[in-house]
Image (tube, helix red, strand yellow):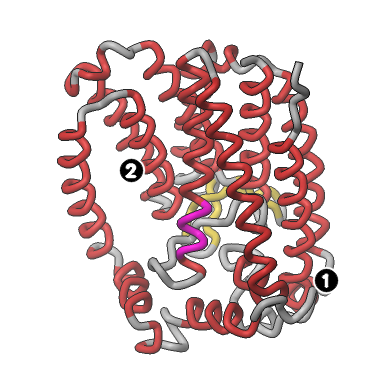
Amino acid sequence: MKKDRPILLIAIIILSIFGVIMIYSASYVWAEYKFNDPYKYLKTQGLFLIIGYIIMYIVSKFNYHKYKKKANIIFGICLILLILVLIPGIGSIRNGSRSWFGIGSLGIQPSEFTKLGLIIFVSKYLSNNQKEIRDIKKGVLPIFGVLLLVFALIMLQPDFGTGIVIVMTIVVLLFISGVKMNFFIKLGLIGLLGIAALILIAPYRIKRIVSFLNPWTDPLGSGFQIIQSLYAIGPGGLLGLGFGNSIQKHFYLPEPQTDFIFSIISEEFGFMGVLIVSFLFITIIVEGFKIAMKCEDLFGKYLAFGIVFGLAFQTLLNLMVVVGLIPVTGVTLPFLSYGGSSLLITLCSMGILLNIKKNN
């Protein structure tokens, strides 16, 4: 019998540990200035990483079929949290969005939990309604209505980036399940109109579009982040400036430990560092696809595909923002960006993938 190699687990561990190390490198200047403690972000993310590993281990031993029985409850809890976070006094405003439950200096972001909760719910629905899914009215519209509800609640925060990742993930799951192509063509046209409307009703989104097209029109305002990101990537060269030697993290690139951490990686480790990190992401995504393809039951297959596509879309969106291919979305980079909620849910999702692999 061929011995199973833990390629997925190894890639997850390497990438997540490297993420914590890079969070320290990217944040210690800002952390010392703001908290008088250069290790502030390192200690917090390190704690979340340890908790995340424990969660991933427990989840990897928990039979994924049980999520199908509890899918409605899991999704219901996620909806309640999305509603509660919008209530002043319960939800906290950070960076202009009411997306957090504040617990001291820490924050819990319910939209991160909703990503996984919705994937579990939709996977159950699709596996139970395989025949009906070809009927747009009976099979597709109910789940599409749920998706619109979730998107609307997230946009009220507002959190456009997370909303887009969720929509793209569920749309791909519907496509895999066999929904007719005509539906997606119509959906794409409606989606473009909807995105245009969302941009027009929010002035800050218009500024992001303008700064994306030409960041130099407002180099000290809406174009500042992308310009500083490109300034970080440019000097990296082949091997980078060396660990800890980033210039842009010295109050040029705002909070570099979050959405733009990939810029600091590029600056300090150069093209080779970018290549290695990209290889690790590709390894996780490819191994995830293999698990999904080999899964024998529909629920596990949809669940695995949903987790992998969600990870892939989020990674791709973040990298495209960092290099200036699309406007700033506020989407974090999985495993690497600072953020406890994101790291915990990502590692929990990886635990589910490992369990699907184990049981198929």
Displayed quadrant of residue 158: bottom left
The circle drawn on residue 38 is 1
Residue found at x 53% / y 80%: 230
Residue 174 covered by magenta stretch: no
The amino acid type, in three-letter code, at marker 1 is Pro
Q: Residue 268 appears at what percent x and percent y?
A: 72, 75
Q: Residue 120 appears at what percent x and percent y?
A: 49, 25
Callout 1 environment at 10 Å: few (<14), some (14 to 19), or many (20+)?
A: some
Q: Gap between marks 1 and 2, in whole Å? A: 38 Å
Which element carries disc 1, helix, strand or loop?
Answer: loop
* 82 to the left or right of 201: right
Displayed quadrant of residue 51: top right
Residue 300 to residue 37: above or below = above
Q: Are discs 1 and 2 less than 8 Å apart at CB?
A: no
* 258 to the left or right of 325: right
Residue found at x 78% / y 52%: 17
Q: Residue 13 appears at what percent x and percent y?
A: 76, 44
* 202 to the left or right of 330: left
Tell me, yes or no, if residue 76 can be seen here: no
Judging by the rendered image, the residue that carries numbered circle 2 is 152
Q: Residue 320 appears at what percent x and percent y?
A: 46, 64
Q: Main secondary structure of the magenta part?
A: helix
Q: Which residues are magenta?
A: 315-320
